Amino acid sequence: MNKISIIIPILNEAEFIEKSLRHVIVNSKQQNVSEIIVVDGGSTDDSKHLVSNFNNVILLSSEKGRAKQMNFGAKHATGNILYFLHADSFPPKNFDQLIIDELEKGNKAGCFRMQFDSNHWWLRLASWLTQFKWRACRGGDQSQFITKRLFNEIGGYDERYTIYEDNILINELYKRKQFVVINKKLYTSARMYRKQGIWKLQYLYWSIYVKKWFGADAGRLHSYYKAKIS
């Protein structure tokens, strides 16, 4: 029987984690979910306390770094399907069954289309484009489901990357022609765009994509990101 392990990496996510966990629990069926695992990377706010209030959620601590945290969660997962979710992303109702349905069709990995919580025309356009399978329209905010077997074959998330780690895994899946976009909307926060400015942040993301395309390694991408982000 297919069972999903939901893995949520956090670092100072007190603003979202409680709402996120409630959303995941309400919008899935217990019989489809092996466990919900929250992996903390060293939060200094109330994140861990808020997670500990949920009796049906496993709280783990690991080294800081989303790739490391997600890999750590995967090692403790008992389900045959891994579902990686950002703390500020909210999947559609019955997302668990939608994922299982894709596995039964033979699709071993994929994501949902996405909608930002913003009415800005550019973010609305960017959201609309996520329904298509184009590689350039992918990102970790859309969440990631993948069979545990395929995840282990790839070697999990590349822990050298402190940014862009989602895209590295997605690239491997596209190479294997193992990616599907479920045509249901996941809602995610545009908080980084609001904080940094839409055009500044979008230019930064495009620049990172292009730099990686031309061979920039993990260290160069991280240095560039740190120099540009406030």
Image (cartoon, helix red, strand yellow):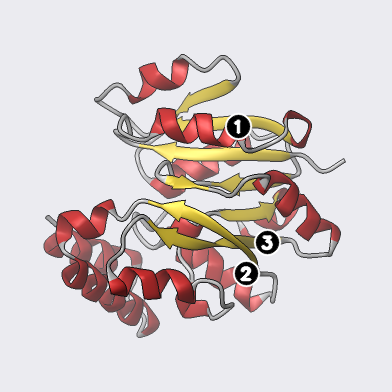
Q: Is residue 33 left or right of residue 188?
A: right
- Mark 2 / mark 1, whichever is N-terminal: 1
Distance between mark 2 and mark 1 Cα atoms:
30 Å
Three-letter amino acid code at the position of disc 2: Leu
Q: Are marks 3 and 2 in contact (CB under 8 Å)?
A: yes
Is 116 on the left or on the right of 201, as rendered?
Answer: right
Q: Horizontal and vertical percent for residue 69?
A: 45, 40
Compute the Cα span from label 3 to label 1.
23 Å
Q: Is the N terminus in the top left, top right, bottom left or bottom right quadrant?
A: top right
* Number of the label disc, if any, that sits on residue 116: none
Q: Residues within 10 Å of mark 1 (few under 14, many from 20)?
A: few
Residue 68 in picture, x, y percent from top left: 45, 44
In the rendered image, residue 6, in percent from the top left (x then y), is placed at 60, 39
| Res 109 label | 3
Above or below, 151 relative to 138 = above
At label 3, counting other C-alpha atoms closer than 10 Å, the crowd grade (few under 14, some 14-19, many 20 or more) is many
Please, what secondary structure does the residue beneath circle 2 have? Answer: helix
Judge depth for marks 3 and 2 and give the one in front: 3
- What residue does disc 1 label? 26
Badge nearest the viewer, 3 or 1 = 1
Label 3: element kind: strand
Residue drawn 34% across the image and 25% down it: 47
Q: Is residue 22 left or right of residue 155?
A: left
Task: Name the element at disc 1.
Answer: helix
Nearer the observer, disc 2 or disc 1? Answer: 1
Percent position (x, y) of residue 164? Answer: 39, 63
Choose the circle earlier in sequence order: 3 or 2: 3
Q: Say which label, 3 or 1, has the lower sequence index.
A: 1
Q: Which residue is mark 2?
A: 173
Could one spot residue 112 in this view of the protein?
yes
Alpha-carbon span between mark 3 and mark 2: 7 Å
